Image: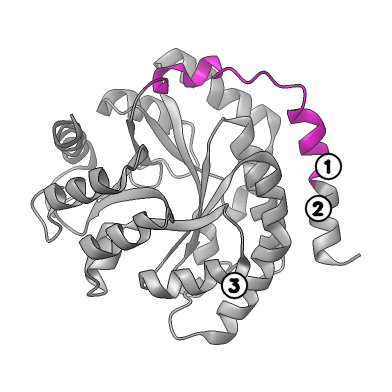
Amino acid sequence: MKRKQFLQQSALGIFSTLSHQKTLLPEFQTNLKGKRFFIGACDWSISNTSNLGAMEMAKEIGLDGVQLSLGLKANNMHLRRKDVQEAYKSLAKIFKVGFTGLGIGELNNYPFKSDPQTDQWVADSIQVAKEFNIKVVLIAFFNQGDLKNDSKGKDAVIQKFKDIMPIAEKVGVTLGIESWLSAEEHMHIIDAVGSSNLKVYYDVANSEKMGFNIYEEIKWLGKKNQICEFHFKENDALLGYGKVDFQRVKNCIDEIGYSGAIQIEGAVPAGKTMLESYLKNNRFVRDLVS
Protein backbone atom coordinates (compact mmCIF):
# COMPACT_ATOMS: atom_id res chain seq x y z
CA MET A 1 0.00 0.00 0.00
CA LYS A 2 1.32 3.44 -0.85
CA ARG A 3 2.38 5.65 2.04
CA LYS A 4 -0.37 8.22 1.41
CA GLN A 5 -3.11 5.57 1.41
CA PHE A 6 -1.74 3.94 4.56
CA LEU A 7 -1.49 7.19 6.50
CA GLN A 8 -4.92 8.41 5.49
CA GLN A 9 -6.57 5.07 6.28
CA SER A 10 -4.84 5.11 9.66
CA ALA A 11 -6.53 8.44 10.25
CA LEU A 12 -10.04 7.00 9.83
CA GLY A 13 -9.96 5.84 13.44
CA ILE A 14 -9.08 9.38 14.51
CA PHE A 15 -12.07 10.85 12.70
CA SER A 16 -14.60 8.38 14.13
CA THR A 17 -13.31 8.97 17.65
CA LEU A 18 -13.31 12.74 17.35
CA SER A 19 -16.85 12.84 16.01
CA HIS A 20 -18.06 11.69 19.43
CA GLN A 21 -15.93 14.07 21.50
CA LYS A 22 -17.36 17.15 23.20
CA THR A 23 -16.27 20.50 21.84
CA LEU A 24 -15.87 21.99 25.31
CA LEU A 25 -12.35 22.60 26.59
CA PRO A 26 -11.31 19.46 28.50
CA GLU A 27 -10.93 19.72 32.26
CA PHE A 28 -7.16 19.35 32.05
CA GLN A 29 -6.96 22.43 29.77
CA THR A 30 -9.36 24.77 31.55
CA ASN A 31 -6.52 26.93 32.90
CA LEU A 32 -5.87 28.10 29.32
CA LYS A 33 -9.43 29.22 28.65
CA GLY A 34 -9.99 32.83 27.65
CA LYS A 35 -6.32 33.88 27.53
CA ARG A 36 -4.82 35.74 24.59
CA PHE A 37 -1.42 34.24 25.40
CA PHE A 38 -0.59 31.14 27.38
CA ILE A 39 2.98 30.64 28.46
CA GLY A 40 4.62 27.25 28.37
CA ALA A 41 8.04 25.71 28.12
CA CYS A 42 9.41 22.81 26.12
CA ASP A 43 9.75 19.71 28.28
CA TRP A 44 13.26 19.30 26.87
CA SER A 45 14.18 22.77 28.19
CA ILE A 46 12.99 22.13 31.75
CA SER A 47 15.03 18.97 32.26
CA ASN A 48 12.16 16.57 31.57
CA THR A 49 12.34 15.44 27.96
CA SER A 50 9.47 13.02 27.33
CA ASN A 51 9.04 12.71 31.09
CA LEU A 52 5.98 13.04 33.31
CA GLY A 53 8.05 15.15 35.70
CA ALA A 54 7.55 18.06 33.32
CA MET A 55 4.10 18.66 34.79
CA GLU A 56 5.28 19.21 38.35
CA MET A 57 8.21 21.27 37.10
CA ALA A 58 5.84 23.51 35.13
CA LYS A 59 3.82 24.07 38.30
CA GLU A 60 6.95 24.98 40.27
CA ILE A 61 8.04 27.48 37.61
CA GLY A 62 4.55 28.99 37.36
CA LEU A 63 3.91 28.15 33.71
CA ASP A 64 0.49 27.75 32.15
CA GLY A 65 1.56 24.45 30.68
CA VAL A 66 4.10 22.32 28.88
CA GLN A 67 5.08 21.78 25.26
CA LEU A 68 5.23 18.01 25.30
CA SER A 69 7.52 15.72 23.33
CA LEU A 70 5.75 13.01 21.36
CA GLY A 71 8.48 10.78 22.72
CA LEU A 72 11.85 9.31 21.94
CA LYS A 73 12.94 6.54 19.65
CA ALA A 74 13.90 4.64 22.80
CA ASN A 75 10.33 4.71 24.19
CA ASN A 76 8.67 4.27 20.78
CA MET A 77 7.10 7.75 20.89
CA HIS A 78 5.24 6.75 24.04
CA LEU A 79 2.79 9.65 24.09
CA ARG A 80 0.88 7.65 21.49
CA ARG A 81 -0.07 5.20 24.25
CA LYS A 82 -3.37 5.73 26.05
CA ASP A 83 -1.95 4.89 29.47
CA VAL A 84 0.78 7.51 29.07
CA GLN A 85 -1.77 10.07 27.87
CA GLU A 86 -3.98 9.42 30.89
CA ALA A 87 -1.00 9.78 33.23
CA TYR A 88 -0.21 13.21 31.80
CA LYS A 89 -3.84 14.30 32.01
CA SER A 90 -4.06 13.19 35.63
CA LEU A 91 -0.98 15.20 36.54
CA ALA A 92 -2.36 18.21 34.68
CA LYS A 93 -5.40 18.13 36.96
CA ILE A 94 -3.31 17.63 40.08
CA PHE A 95 -0.85 20.45 39.35
CA LYS A 96 -3.35 22.66 37.49
CA VAL A 97 -1.13 23.11 34.44
CA GLY A 98 -2.14 22.47 30.86
CA PHE A 99 -0.61 21.40 27.57
CA THR A 100 0.57 24.35 25.51
CA GLY A 101 2.04 22.40 22.61
CA LEU A 102 3.49 19.24 21.12
CA GLY A 103 6.77 18.62 19.32
CA ILE A 104 8.79 15.83 17.74
CA GLY A 105 12.38 16.62 18.63
CA GLU A 106 13.61 13.17 17.57
CA LEU A 107 13.19 14.30 13.97
CA ASN A 108 16.55 16.01 14.46
CA ASN A 109 18.10 12.56 14.81
CA TYR A 110 15.77 10.58 12.55
CA PRO A 111 14.99 13.02 9.73
CA PHE A 112 11.52 13.42 8.34
CA LYS A 113 13.09 14.06 4.94
CA SER A 114 14.70 10.62 4.70
CA ASP A 115 13.62 8.19 7.46
CA PRO A 116 10.42 6.25 6.56
CA GLN A 117 9.45 5.55 10.19
CA THR A 118 8.95 9.26 10.78
CA ASP A 119 5.95 9.35 8.43
CA GLN A 120 3.90 7.47 11.00
CA TRP A 121 5.30 9.54 13.86
CA VAL A 122 4.07 12.74 12.24
CA ALA A 123 0.71 11.25 11.27
CA ASP A 124 0.19 9.89 14.80
CA SER A 125 1.20 13.22 16.37
CA ILE A 126 -1.94 14.73 14.88
CA GLN A 127 -4.13 12.25 16.76
CA VAL A 128 -2.16 12.89 19.96
CA ALA A 129 -2.55 16.65 19.57
CA LYS A 130 -6.32 16.29 19.27
CA GLU A 131 -6.38 14.02 22.31
CA PHE A 132 -4.77 16.81 24.36
CA ASN A 133 -6.67 19.66 22.68
CA ILE A 134 -3.36 20.96 21.30
CA LYS A 135 -3.61 23.03 18.14
CA VAL A 136 0.00 22.95 16.88
CA VAL A 137 2.61 20.23 16.40
CA LEU A 138 6.23 21.36 16.01
CA ILE A 139 8.04 19.49 13.22
CA ALA A 140 11.78 19.97 13.77
CA PHE A 141 14.44 20.17 11.05
CA PHE A 142 17.84 20.49 12.72
CA ASN A 143 21.01 18.40 12.99
CA GLN A 144 20.48 15.33 10.79
CA GLY A 145 17.20 16.77 9.54
CA ASP A 146 18.58 20.16 8.44
CA LEU A 147 17.06 21.44 5.18
CA LYS A 148 19.44 24.35 4.58
CA ASN A 149 21.01 24.04 1.11
CA ASP A 150 19.36 20.63 0.66
CA SER A 151 17.07 20.87 -2.34
CA LYS A 152 16.56 17.10 -2.47
CA GLY A 153 15.57 17.07 1.18
CA LYS A 154 13.13 19.95 0.65
CA ASP A 155 11.51 18.13 -2.26
CA ALA A 156 11.11 14.99 -0.15
CA VAL A 157 9.59 16.97 2.72
CA ILE A 158 7.15 18.71 0.37
CA GLN A 159 5.88 15.37 -0.90
CA LYS A 160 5.60 13.91 2.59
CA PHE A 161 3.63 16.93 3.82
CA LYS A 162 1.32 16.62 0.82
CA ASP A 163 0.56 13.06 1.92
CA ILE A 164 -0.01 13.91 5.58
CA MET A 165 -1.69 17.33 5.54
CA PRO A 166 -5.18 16.00 4.68
CA ILE A 167 -5.15 14.28 8.08
CA ALA A 168 -4.24 17.51 9.86
CA GLU A 169 -6.80 19.49 7.88
CA LYS A 170 -9.56 17.03 8.72
CA VAL A 171 -9.08 17.40 12.47
CA GLY A 172 -8.00 21.04 12.65
CA VAL A 173 -4.37 20.62 13.73
CA THR A 174 -1.57 22.78 12.34
CA LEU A 175 1.92 21.43 11.67
CA GLY A 176 4.67 23.98 12.25
CA ILE A 177 8.02 23.89 10.46
CA GLU A 178 10.96 24.94 12.66
CA SER A 179 14.29 25.06 10.88
CA TRP A 180 17.29 27.19 9.94
CA LEU A 181 15.46 28.45 6.85
CA SER A 182 14.51 32.06 6.16
CA ALA A 183 10.92 33.24 6.00
CA GLU A 184 11.05 33.11 2.19
CA GLU A 185 12.50 29.59 2.19
CA HIS A 186 9.81 28.41 4.57
CA MET A 187 7.14 29.90 2.34
CA HIS A 188 8.56 28.06 -0.68
CA ILE A 189 7.82 24.78 1.09
CA ILE A 190 4.43 25.89 2.41
CA ASP A 191 3.29 27.21 -0.98
CA ALA A 192 4.43 24.01 -2.69
CA VAL A 193 2.46 21.87 -0.24
CA GLY A 194 -0.61 24.08 -0.55
CA SER A 195 -2.20 23.50 2.85
CA SER A 196 -3.46 26.21 5.20
CA ASN A 197 -2.63 23.87 8.10
CA LEU A 198 1.12 24.00 7.41
CA LYS A 199 2.82 27.10 8.84
CA VAL A 200 6.07 28.43 10.26
CA TYR A 201 7.00 27.70 13.86
CA TYR A 202 8.93 30.88 14.58
CA ASP A 203 11.95 30.65 16.89
CA VAL A 204 13.36 34.13 17.42
CA ALA A 205 16.81 32.99 18.56
CA ASN A 206 17.30 30.62 15.65
CA SER A 207 16.44 33.31 13.14
CA GLU A 208 18.64 35.87 14.90
CA LYS A 209 21.54 33.40 14.85
CA MET A 210 21.11 32.95 11.09
CA GLY A 211 21.31 36.71 10.59
CA PHE A 212 17.69 37.21 9.54
CA ASN A 213 15.77 40.38 10.41
CA ILE A 214 13.43 38.68 12.84
CA TYR A 215 11.17 41.71 13.30
CA GLU A 216 10.55 42.13 9.58
CA GLU A 217 10.16 38.36 9.14
CA ILE A 218 7.53 38.21 11.87
CA LYS A 219 5.57 41.05 10.28
CA TRP A 220 5.91 39.63 6.75
CA LEU A 221 4.87 36.12 7.75
CA GLY A 222 2.22 37.43 10.11
CA LYS A 223 0.51 39.45 7.41
CA LYS A 224 0.19 36.19 5.48
CA ASN A 225 -1.09 34.45 8.64
CA GLN A 226 1.79 32.00 8.36
CA ILE A 227 3.11 31.88 11.95
CA CYS A 228 1.47 29.15 14.02
CA GLU A 229 3.44 29.54 17.25
CA PHE A 230 6.52 31.13 18.84
CA HIS A 231 9.57 29.98 20.72
CA PHE A 232 10.88 32.76 22.95
CA LYS A 233 14.48 31.68 23.23
CA GLU A 234 17.98 32.97 23.89
CA ASN A 235 21.25 31.12 23.58
CA ASP A 236 23.23 31.20 26.87
CA ALA A 237 21.33 34.17 28.29
CA LEU A 238 18.14 34.88 30.16
CA LEU A 239 15.29 36.27 28.10
CA GLY A 240 15.79 40.02 27.86
CA TYR A 241 19.56 39.79 28.39
CA GLY A 242 20.65 38.42 25.05
CA LYS A 243 20.60 39.45 21.41
CA VAL A 244 16.84 39.44 20.81
CA ASP A 245 14.88 42.64 21.48
CA PHE A 246 11.77 41.07 22.96
CA GLN A 247 9.93 44.35 23.27
CA ARG A 248 10.21 44.72 19.50
CA VAL A 249 9.10 41.11 19.12
CA LYS A 250 6.03 41.84 21.27
CA ASN A 251 5.28 44.95 19.20
CA CYS A 252 5.43 42.84 16.02
CA ILE A 253 3.20 40.19 17.59
CA ASP A 254 0.67 42.89 18.45
CA GLU A 255 0.88 44.27 14.92
CA ILE A 256 0.05 40.92 13.32
CA GLY A 257 -2.63 40.11 15.90
CA TYR A 258 -1.14 36.85 17.09
CA SER A 259 -2.70 35.00 20.01
CA GLY A 260 -1.87 31.58 21.35
CA ALA A 261 1.09 29.82 22.89
CA ILE A 262 4.44 31.38 23.69
CA GLN A 263 6.87 28.60 24.52
CA ILE A 264 10.08 29.36 26.43
CA GLU A 265 13.12 27.45 25.21
CA GLY A 266 16.82 27.59 26.09
CA ALA A 267 17.65 30.82 27.96
CA VAL A 268 19.83 29.36 30.72
CA PRO A 269 23.10 31.29 31.26
CA ALA A 270 26.34 29.63 32.22
CA GLY A 271 26.56 29.10 35.97
CA LYS A 272 22.78 29.31 36.50
CA THR A 273 20.42 26.42 37.13
CA MET A 274 17.48 25.69 34.91
CA LEU A 275 14.98 26.35 37.69
CA GLU A 276 16.28 29.74 38.75
CA SER A 277 16.57 30.74 35.10
CA TYR A 278 13.04 29.66 34.24
CA LEU A 279 11.51 31.39 37.22
CA LYS A 280 13.01 34.59 35.83
CA ASN A 281 12.16 33.78 32.21
CA ASN A 282 8.55 33.09 33.09
CA ARG A 283 8.27 36.37 34.98
CA PHE A 284 9.91 38.25 32.11
CA VAL A 285 7.43 36.92 29.55
CA ARG A 286 4.44 37.56 31.81
CA ASP A 287 5.51 41.15 32.40
CA LEU A 288 6.13 41.61 28.68
CA VAL A 289 2.73 40.39 27.50
CA SER A 290 0.60 41.71 30.36
Percent position of residue 172, x then y: 62, 41
The Cα atoms of the two marked residues, 2 and 1, are separated by 7 Å
| Outermost residue, left side | 241
What's the mark number on residue 12? 1
Residue visible at 72% across and 53% down in the picture? 166
Q: Secondary structure at mark 2?
A: helix
Three-letter amino acid code of the residue under disc 2 = Gln
Asked if disc 3 and disc 1 are in contact, CB closer than 8 Å, the reply is no
Write the start and end of the magenta stretch as one range: 11-34
Q: Is residue 223 left or right of residue 88?
A: left
Residue visible at 32% across and 62% down in the picture? 220
What's the mark number on residue 192? 3
Residue visible at 14% across and 32% down in the picture? 287
Q: Secondary structure at mark 3?
A: helix
The Cα atoms of the two marked residues, 2 and 3, are separated by 20 Å
Q: Tell which of 224 and 70 is nearer to you.
A: 224
Give the labeled residue for mark 2. Answer: 8
Percent position of residue 230, x then y: 34, 49
The Cα atoms of the two marked residues, 3 and 1, are separated by 26 Å
Using the rendered view, name the quadrant where residue 184 is placed.
Answer: bottom left
Asked if disc 2 and disc 3 are in contact, CB closer than 8 Å, the reply is no
Three-letter amino acid code of the residue under disc 1 = Leu
Using the rendered view, name the quadrant where residue 63 is placed.
Answer: top left
Percent position of residue 7, x then y: 79, 55
Q: Is residue 14 magenta?
A: yes
Q: Secondary structure at mark 1?
A: helix
Asked if disc 2 and disc 1 are in contact, CB closer than 8 Å, the reply is yes
